[in-house]
Image: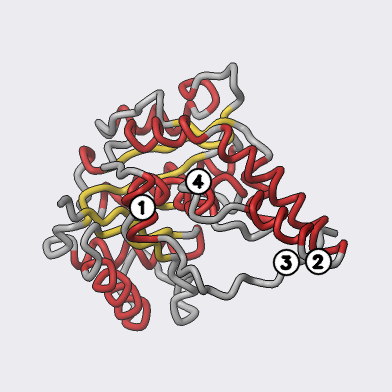
């Protein structure tokens, strides 16, 4: 069984990039961790020097990943970027399970600048180009990643980082909806959570109209996600990630059947 730890770096706070790690986790299994603000130091690491509190917090997350048979994904927000890169630079000789680093980028200029800065810092931290992947998000259906993310693609090629045209998440409203309703994306994609079933049960049991209406919105968002599931699988494969079956994912990662579902909130 392959034990792989992946670090996913966001370059913006868009819904697509916030969903990307969950989408990849749906294909790979293992654990998915998103470190909270690291003792308030995440935005104050200059020149990637280690900050003790951040270092200890990230090592704890990494060790948690080591306990999982499959490893997993550490989802790094823009605010945590410097701290995570400092951790990688300090410990790269012992982080042998961290074989893949994914940097997400969107077409907007701010995201592309942040992505180039992240790639530059990773290379300076000693990460081999062969271990770095680029995931383009929010790309229009008729566009090519070389055109919409030209600065990132140009830098990547100069740094000998391979750009894979198939590693693209197209523009979709389903990401924003999934974030709005706090949907467990990986569980939905693997049929471990089914809002269609919950809606039917709510109707039969006479749940309040507000609850039923909110579930109906989740059903629409779920259908959008499931309609593009094949794309997500291709993206994970293009990034070189090991994919598992839905049965394997449900056996290892599905929420407990007696879990307490979060209270459904009607949309604004």
Find numbered disc 1 in the image and state the secondary structure of the residue it sits on. helix
Query: Is label 4 in a helix, a strand or a loop?
Result: helix
Q: In terms of sequence position, does the residue under pointer 3 or pointer 1 come before the other?
A: 1
Q: Is residue 96 left or right of residue 55?
A: left
Q: Residues within 10 Å of mark 3 (few under 14, many from 20)?
A: some
**45 relative position to 71: left or right:** right
Q: On the image, numbered disc 1 is attached to which residue?
A: 249
Frontmost residue, 250 versus 171: 250
Circle 2 residue: 207
The residue drawn where x is 77% and y is 65% is: 205
> Badge 3 is on which residue?
264
Residue beneath label 4, please?
A: 189
For this orientation, the residue located farthest to the top is: 142
Front residue of 211 and 58: 211
Q: Residue at x 19, y 66 (%)?
A: 91
Rounded to the nearest angstrom, the CA distance separating label 1 from label 4 is 10 Å
């Amino acid at each position: 069984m392959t034990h792989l730890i992946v670090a996913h770096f966001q370059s913006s706070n868009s819904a697509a990039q916030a969903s990307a790690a969950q989408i990849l986790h749906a294909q790979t299994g293992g654990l998915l961790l998103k470190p909270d603000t690291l003792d308030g130091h995440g935005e104050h690491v200059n020149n990637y020097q280690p900050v003790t509190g951040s270092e200890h917090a990230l090592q704890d997350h990494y060790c948690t990943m080591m306990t999982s048979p499959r490893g997993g994904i550490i989802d790094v927000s823009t605010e945590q970027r410097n701290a995570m890169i400092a951790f990688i630079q300090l410990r790269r000789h012992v982080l042998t399970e961290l074989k893949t680093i994914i940097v997400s980028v969107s077409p907007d200029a701010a995201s592309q600048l942040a992505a180039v800065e992240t790639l530059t810092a990773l290379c300076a931290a000693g990460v081999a180009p062969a271990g770095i992947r680029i995931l383009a998000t929010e790309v229009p259906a008729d566009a090519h990643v070389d055109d919409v993310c030209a600065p990132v693609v140009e830098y990547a090629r100069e740094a000998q980082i391979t750009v894979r045209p198939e590693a693209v998440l197209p523009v979709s409203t389903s990401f924003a909806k999934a974030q709005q309703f706090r949907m467990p994306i990986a569980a939905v994609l693997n049929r471990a959570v089914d809002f269609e079933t919950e809606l039917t049960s709510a109707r039969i049991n006479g749940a309040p109209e507000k609850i039923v209406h909110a579930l109906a919105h989740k059903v629409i968002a779920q259908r959008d996600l499931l309609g593009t599931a094949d794309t997500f699988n291709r993206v994970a494969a293009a990034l070189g990630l090991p994919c598992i079956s839905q049965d394997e994912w449900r056996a290892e990662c599905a929420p407990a059947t007696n879990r307490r579902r979060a209270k459904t909130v009607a949309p604004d």
